[in-house]
Amino acid sequence: MKTNVAVVFGGRSVEHEIAIISAVQAMASMDREKYDIYPVYMNKNGVFYSGEALFDIDTFRHAEKITALCDRVALVAGDGDGRAKIEYLKGGLFRKKAVSIDVCFPIVHGTNCEDGSVQGFFETIGVPYVGCDVMSSAIGMDKALFKNVLHDCGLPVLPAVVFGARYFSAERDKALEKIKEKIGFPAIVKPANLGSSVGISKVGDENELIAALNLAFSFSDRVLVEHAIDSLREINCSVLGDRNDCEASALEEPVMHDKILSYDDKYRTNAKSSGSKGMASLSRKLPADLPEEKAEEIKKIAVETFRCIGAAGVVRIDFLMDTADNDKVYVNEINTIPGSLAFYLWEVAGVKYPELIDRMIALAFKRQRERENLMFTLDTNILNESSFGAKGSKGKLG
């Protein structure tokens, strides 16, 4: 019997389009002999649609096609059987029959999605799902929190300062002075909870810093500033598994041309020339040209980072290497649902995309089996034993 997989993608995020590219790629690579695939697209207003047209990237170039060719749906809890249902919301007497879903496969990027929001929804309706859980997703999305957690785990991260929008508005001079004193120039300015290099700037003086902070605050109410490494190499590594059993992929070095990779570098430029292949089309050295000892060091830190936040499924961890400081390595950030699911980093090791997807789905079911041994409710009769708020009630809470 085939496994019914709901691929949930899109969402209320500035990285909405990137999620579409990643999802269409993944669905095209799933083994149809093993899976019945049900695309569930969340538009930018949080409305869910499903339909065959969602397998085609061209559908998303014309929004009217989605409403014309697809059904509006809801993803709801099943009947206590550890499954979910896709309910069709229109049709009256001729409404399509609900479809039972065995596992949800979220392919979403950015806030309101990858940050634990979608994962929390899956937890609430009690369906197995692929990838990081609520906590690790939330930690991974918040760059400031991620740094703090890794620092406490003894992993190498660059020092940073973090400001909220309200504080910066009220105490701008103090904030700027703190940045110049603790970080200096050049510096990197980032929204605290976005990915895909959205809103990131490299600055060399105070005027550029102010402009970069204003840009970052337009995307997030918290902004992180850290020192920019002049003699920089960026190295990326994927990790697959769970906290008990995980492995690192091959390493890649994005071709940067002496600047940080922007959103346009990662997606727009490559989409124009390669047919919307997302991160898979980025210019890179794969595997990265590194001494074996340095490569193993980075892989070891990648696995430790994965375990530190309790990640699961496939992630991509981005590293900064300071070539002017004996090739010292720092963890930059983690992508808990990486663009293109980082499949290209696994193909080098002989793990083809369909196999990678199989392993991710297997990990989702493994986690669900482990959780079935945990207790989430108590068998009590407290509502029948007391009355609350009724006349003459003497019952108390707490």
Image (cartoon, grey):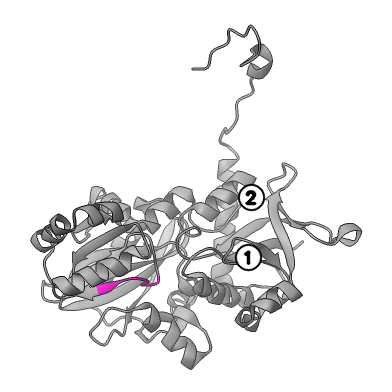
The foreground one among 46 and 283 is: 46
Q: Amino acid at mark 2?
A: Val
Q: Which mark is residue 70?
A: none
Q: Residues within 10 Å of mark 1 (few under 14, many from 20)?
A: many
Is 221 placed left or right of 17 in the picture?
A: left
Q: Secondary structure at mark 2?
A: loop
Q: Is residue 72 visible?
A: yes
The span from disc 2 to disc 1 (Cα, nearest Å) is 13 Å
Seen at 71% across and 67% down, the residue is 50
Q: Position of residue 181 (x, y in %)?
A: 8, 60
Is 358 placed left or right of 206 in the picture?
A: right
Q: Position of residue 130 (x, y in %)?
A: 56, 58
Residue at the limit of the structure toward the front, as seen here: 170
Q: Is residue 296 visible?
A: no
Q: Amino acid at mark 1?
A: Val
Q: Earlier in the sequence, mark 2 or mark 1?
A: 1
The foreground one among 301 and 88 is: 88
Instruction: Give above or below for 266 relative to 128.
Output: below
Residue wearing tag 1: 7
Q: Residue 159 is drawn in which quadrant? A: bottom left
Is 258 placed left or right of 31 in the picture?
A: left
Residue 220 is covered by the magenta coloring:
no
The foreground one among 290 and 61 is: 61
Q: Which residues are magenta?
A: 196-201
Residue at the limit of the structure toward the right, as seen here: 93
Seen at 73% across and 47% down, the residue is 78
Is 338 placed left or right of 189 in the picture?
A: right
Q: Position of residue 87 (x, y in %)?
A: 76, 56
The N terminus lies in quadrant: bottom right
Seen at 60% across and 40% down, the residue is 372
